[in-house]
Image (cartoon, rainbow, N blue to C red):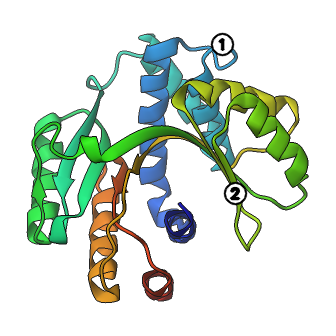
Amino acid sequence: MSGHSKWSTIKRKKGAADAKRGQLFTRLAREIVIAVREGGGDPETNFRLRLTVDRARGLNMPKENIDRAIKRGTGEDKDGAQIEQITYEGYAPHGIALMIDCLTENRNRTVSELRHALTHAGGSMGEVGSVSWQFDRIAYFGIEGKGVDFDKLFELALEGGAEDIDQDEEGYIEITAPVDAFKTISDLLKDAKIEIDEAELRMVPKQEIGLDGEKTVKIMRLIENIEDLDDVQNVYSNLEVSEEALAAMEEE
């Protein structure tokens, strides 16, 4: 996970530019709508909504945007088309498998944009089930380690059912757990007043594929291009992210 985590950190820094903030708020609003439809409009009783709203506030999304998205989810605000949550499967060059989570108001547009991005780079869309067997869904938490008692955090995470707790050389802490432990661990961390930087259900590859540096960077660029599409929320791959490739991406 460490290579992917460092890459995520690089992407977060790049994505902090104000030019992308409107796109970011649109994505967050869609996530809020879906969360409300699944569990209601009260963040205190809807765990997924609470996490999404906390993340939106942390990224300075205006309160009126958050409230509007919640009302759209509950049906109070009937403006806008129906949002669908869809996961597409595909291949990058060299057989690298991709799982692409989307929230879209226009399925045809989304498929067309994904197909264009993939085929332009030498990849392709996949049939349902062609890629998903290569991934497991897990609960993931990322925590900035500064000021955090790692031993206490370790005990809390284990108590909640975590399978792995790791801290990198920069102090960033990652917790992975079965999906059904997601809410338990989140509540334990919240009760302990440990601030969560990232909390989500992720797809992780059962086995990663390593390529040379140039090929790895090419696929990382493709993944970033896909992530820049308006309807795409997350992209997961079985690409092994090397230190050499990370250094090249960080310089861009």
Secondary structure category for the residue under label 2: strand
* Among numbered discs 1 and 2, the one appearing first in the sequence: 1
**213 relative to 48, above or below:** below
Residue at 34% x, 66% y is 239
Asked whether residue 231 appears in the rendered view, the answer is no
Alpha carbons under labels 1 and 2: distance apart? 30 Å
Total numbered badges shown on the rendered structure: 2
Q: Amino acid at mark 2?
A: Asp
Residue at 51% x, 26% y is 68
Comparing 29 with 39, the one in front is 39
On the image, the x and y values in percent for residue 102 come to: 30, 41
Asked whether residue 180 appears in the rendered view, the answer is yes
On the image, the x and y values in percent for residue 85 come to: 31, 30
**Quadrant of residue 30 in the image?**
top left
**Quadrant of residue 96 in the image?**
bottom left
Is 111 situated left or right of 223 in this image?
left
Residue at 49% x, 29% y is 32
Q: Which residue is mark 2?
A: 166
Is 83 situated left or right of 141 in this image?
left
Looking at the image, do the residues carrying marks 1 and 2 touch, with CB atoms under 8 Å apart?
A: no
Q: Which residue is mark 1?
A: 45
Residue at 53% x, 68% y is 17
Comparing 151 with 50, the one in front is 151
**111 relative to 98, above or below:** above
On the image, the x and y values in percent for residue 20 come to: 45, 61
Question: What number is the disc on residue 65?
Answer: none
Is 43 situated left or right of 215 in this image?
right
**191 relative to 143, above or below:** above
Tell me if mark 2 has few (under 14), some (14-19) or many (20+) residues whose alpha carbon lies within 10 angstroms of its own.
some
On the image, the x and y values in percent for residue 98 come to: 26, 54
Q: Amino acid at mark 1?
A: Thr
